[in-house]
Amino acid sequence: MFVKICGITNREDALAAIDAGARALGFIFYPPSPRSVTVEQIEGWVAGLPAQVWKVGVFVDEAGPVIEEVAARAGLDVAQLHGGETPDRYPTSLRVWKGIRVDRDSEVADYPHAEAILLDGAAYDWTRTAHFTRPLILAGRLDAENVRARIEVAKPWGVDVASGIELSPGRKDHALMKKFIEAALRS
């Protein structure tokens, strides 16, 4: 089990997440998001983060070569794709996690073209995950109060949180973040 803290916009929050036990940090490269960053904003300090912490770039319908350029400049390890990208458009130099928005009635097919599948949705029936052949990451309105119950039902590879631990979009509440990580990693 690992925890990814997504929507990191500044070095202070990144270091607090790492200190609290996060194993992955998400940087959103999608301008409409209130948590969006640019390469210029983060490239000066991301390279100094511990190598064992995965740096994940979140993209929506971006071209593979653009993702690869951003990844090289920002020192990313993983591309998390949330649009209509097909495997022929994936970046070739990075691990790929495929993000899929789900709701209560979603029928989600297995997706063998990515290293992992991230299901993003608060109302999804987490008992419907046994058919996936790829590691599963849970996301969508997670917080310290509900993460353990969702983990026990879905048995994921990891969990991903952004808004459930924020003071405001892109600014993390370090105490909530620590509480979330402790709850997620509790056995």
Image (cartoon, helix red, strand yellow):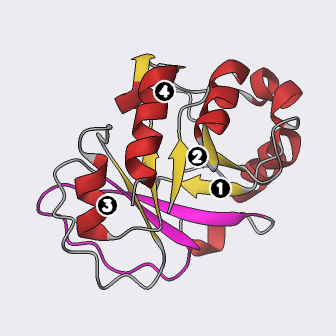
- Rounded to the nearest whole Å, what is the CA distance between mark 2 and mark 1? 7 Å
Residue located beneath label 2 in the image: 59
Comes first in the chain, label 3 or label 2: 2
Secondary structure category for the residue under label 2: strand
Q: Amino acid at mark 1?
A: Ala
**Contact, mark 3 vs mark 2 (Cβ under 8 Å):** no
Q: Which residue is mark 1?
A: 79
| Residue type of the residue flagged with mark 3 | Ile
* Residue occupying the point 29% across, 53% down: 148
The amino acid at mark 2 is Phe
Snapshot quadrant of residue 58: top right
User: Rounded to the nearest whole Å, what is the CA distance between mark 3 and mark 2?
Assistant: 25 Å
Residue that label 3 marks: 151
Question: What is the CA distance from the residue labelled 4 to the residue labelled 3?
Answer: 30 Å
Q: Is residue 62 above or below residue 126?
A: above
Q: Is residue 74 left or right of residue 121?
A: right
Classify residue 65 as left or right of residue 122. right
Q: Is residue 78 visible?
A: yes
Q: Dot 2, how many residues are within 10 Å of its Cα: few (below 14), some (14-19), or many (20+)?
A: many
